[in-house]
Amino acid sequence: MAQKIHIVEDDLAFGKMLGSFLERKGFQISISSTGERARKAITEGDFNLLITDLKLPDDSGLDLLEFSQKTSPNTKVILMTGYAEVDTAVKAIKKGAIDYISKPFRPEELLMIIEEDALNSKAENTDKSDTANEFKKAETPQVKPNFVVGISDSSKKFNEYIKLVGPTDMCVLIQGESGTGKEVAAKAIHDFSSRNNKTFVAVDCGAIPNEIAASEFFGHLKGSFTGAVNDKKGHFEAADGGTLFLDEVGNLSYENQIQLLRALQERRIKPVGSNTEIEVDVRILSATNEDLLKAVQEGKFREDLYHRLNEFSIHIPSLHERKEDLFLFIEYFLAEANASLGKEVLGLSKEVEEAFKAYSWPGNLRELKNVIKRSVLLTNSSLIPLEVIPREVIFSVNKKSEKVDFSKETNEKQLILNALKEADFNKTKAAKLLNITRKTLYNKLELYNIEL
């Protein structure tokens, strides 16, 4: 039986075009041009999917989303929105929409979202019915992951990799800029694995002095060296059966790399001062913000250890690479700060929103978290005001406005070329970077005779 889709779009020509396309793909389509008609259709119909514009003449997509959830809870919702309204689209995702799509878009892009959701739903149903599936326990945490999932393309790819490698026992090398949340990613991989009910041990390799690294990793016996007043269990033994996360693994000395490699190969460790080896079952996740391959070429990092740690690699995108996720992280860190500081700050003022959008966040999520916590502490109203925001964030507003100011015709062509290059010549992404519609971008390309 064909899936029933209801489209809510006040642009009649666009709505009809979208409906005709989906009908050709085998869907049963009905269309409303106002919120009032849509509410009536939702109440009387039994739709599999509701596709609604964010802004309607008499209603809003967010309100229709809430109405649909109450009236027809089994109906899924996709929101159509302009890029400038992405923060509102984020709220829709948090309220239960399965996805959003930025206007203007090609119907094929919408079809991809619908088909992807259908595949995910089919996979979830298969997992529920197959109680003998050995990966079921490992996949259970996917229902409520303990991290911000994200809605940007780079975040979706990153999350897919985590879900893919999580249930395996492969060693994973997590790479990314400082402050992107590598330990959070490692914990997510652990939570998706069959080891999730065992210990997760995180170790900062850069904070361990070379002289005591063997003791830290493998433990020691009382009296084995000066200062060893008690027996000590090392990180490997503490993580037995679970996961050991080695942060900044590139900081290990060459000697420590040799010891680590042997432990990984033999699955055995020998505490300092002991003649007895201990068998350990540990999954190794490691992270670095350095180029380990370059370190290998320079002879600073063992090639055999690099390949042992890098059975699978994941790159964590910087916050600059996933600007669409910014307001998801803001809400997450705002809730954390309120709970930690005993405050009830509701959100950002409009001026702060603009400043946050314009800022490049070189310190990534760590910087955003710190700025949010500091701002919540200094805020005595319901919304965070501009005066409590660090100066470097405020000054970025002027820099951003210079970057995308289309009133300066002499710079406009170069701005467009820069955006296209940054987006790998993907026009849709370039239009988002420039904060204009794709139609406007096409007009500009024609105006300046830019050929791609």
Image (tube, grey):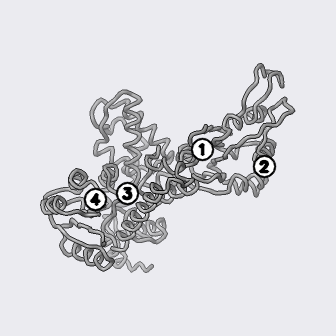
Give the spatial CA distance, label 3 vs label 2. Answer: 55 Å
Q: Which dot, 1 or 2, sits closer to the camera?
A: 1
Precedes in sequence: disc 4 or disc 1: 4
Crowding near the residue tagged with mark 2, few <14, some 14–19, many ≥20 C-alpha atoms within 10 Å? few
Residue drawn at x 41%, y 46% is: 329
Give the spatial CA distance, label 1 vs label 2. Answer: 20 Å
Q: Pointer 3: what residue?
A: 402
Q: Pointer 4: what residue?
A: 75
Depth order, front residue of 80/243: 243
49 versus 14 height, above or below: above
- Which amino acid, mark 1? Arg
Q: How many marks?
A: 4
Question: Where residue 142 sits: x, y (%)?
Answer: 47, 50
Which quadrant of the structure image shows residue 294?
A: bottom right
Q: Which dot, 2 or 4, sits closer to the camera?
A: 4
Crowding near the residue tagged with mark 3, few <14, some 14–19, many ≥20 C-alpha atoms within 10 Å? few
Q: Pointer 2: what residue?
A: 265
Q: Contact, CB < 8 Å: mark 1 with mark 2?
A: no
Precedes in sequence: disc 1 or disc 2: 1
Precedes in sequence: disc 2 or disc 4: 4
Question: Where residue 403 sits: x, y (%)?
Answer: 39, 59
Q: Pointer 1: what residue?
A: 195
Question: Please, what secondary structure does the residue beneath circle 4 have?
Answer: loop
Precedes in sequence: disc 1 or disc 3: 1
Give the spatial CA distance, label 4 vs label 1. Answer: 35 Å
Give the spatial CA distance, label 1 vs label 3. Answer: 51 Å
142 versus 27 height, above or below: above
Give the spatial CA distance, label 2 vs label 4. Answer: 51 Å
Left or right of residue 430, residue 292 in this image: right
Crowding near the residue tagged with mark 4, few <14, some 14–19, many ≥20 C-alpha atoms within 10 Å? many
28 versus 435 height, above or below: below
Q: Which dot, 3 or 4, sits closer to the camera?
A: 4
